Image: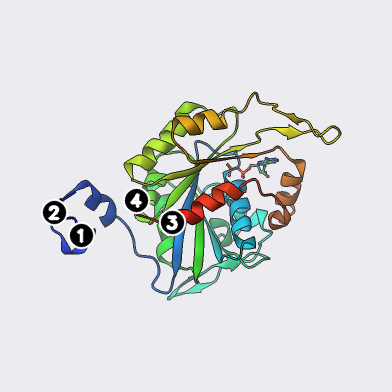
Amino acid sequence: MSENCSHNCSSCSKSCSSRTQESMLKEPHKQSSVKKVIGIVSGKGGVGKSLTTALLAAFAQKQGLSVGIMDADITGPSIPRMFGVKEHATGDENGINTVLSPSGMQLMSMNLLLEEETAPVVWRGPVIAGAVMQFWTDVIWKDVDLLFIDMPPGTGDVPLTVFQSIPIAGIVVVATPQDLVKMVVEKAVNMANMLQIPVLGLVENMSYFECPDCGKKLEIFGRSKAEQIAAEYAIPTIARIPIDPKISEYADAGRIEDYETDALAEIFARIQKTERN
Ligand code: ADP
């Protein structure tokens, strides 16, 4: 970066590392207004990334914020199902409209655009990344305070393109105790560092099971490693979500907004304090 960096790449001819990242950012739809974007990432599918996105979004909305969810998990979209949303998104030459969840959150997902919810999306990486880009450039996000992006799993080309193209203020990493191993977290942290995006929180999903009879917390998959790993990578907040049959019951019934939990309160507070640099 130049010594006299003005942080305005459009009026600067210098080629520096900050410039490359900034210049890849895409403009949102001209009628969109999004104050802050947070990415939810995981090393692989099926660990509770969408669940974390849904619970964080619902928590934020209950605090009075205007919330949106972009389901960027194009090949495994599960956000509409969790919110019980079945209608199709509408649009015209001007842009694509979001679909509202029962409580009024703005949602966009591949499943809201497909004729058949069960139709598989068999696209290659660049096409998938292109679709996610359109969720940013062509979808009209109306006065959103916090937009959560349920990212494609992993740290490959697609999430990388998304991270470089959308101004993400911070990420939250989700893992289960079995794969809450250094390598998974390290990859996510390295990607975030490379793009100068802070890792705001670490979620250990399916962390324990609380016995309904005695209230004892049983760490079925072994002792929690969340604190240790968060400390190692200087991740400021952690959350532990238990295995709870009610979660799958609510998710399957499309009523995830009704599931009450404050497990993600600290991560939410950290998100609130973060500004994109
Ligand atoms: P991902 O987005 O990482 O692929 P999901 O959030 O879609 O994973 O979760 C996969 C499935 O596991 C969903 O059916 C979800 O309801 C269920 N699930 C996730 N976390 C829990 C939990 N803590 N307790 C019970 N069921 C869970």
Q: CA distance from mark 1 to mark 2?
A: 11 Å
Type of amino acid under label 2 = Lys
Q: CA distance from mark 4 to mark 1?
A: 20 Å
Quick one: 152 or 92, which is closer to the camera?
152
Q: Is residue 139 left or right of residue 227?
A: left
Q: CA distance from mark 3 to mark 2?
A: 31 Å
Tell me residue 150's x, y (percent): 52, 50
Tell me residue 41's x, y (percent): 49, 43
Label 3 CB, ligand 1: below 8 Å?
no
Q: Residues within 10 Å of mark 1 (few under 14, many from 20)?
A: few
Q: Nearer the viewer, mark 3 or mark 1?
A: 1
Q: Would you name the residue on which mark 1 appears?
A: 6
Q: CA distance from mark 2 to mark 4?
A: 19 Å
Whether residue 39 is visible, yes or no, is yes
Element at label 2: loop
Q: Residues within 10 Å of mark 2 (few under 14, many from 20)?
A: few
Q: Earlier in the sequence, mark 3 or mark 2?
A: 2
Q: Nearer the viewer, mark 4 or mark 1?
A: 1
Residue beneath the point at 61% across and 62% down: 61
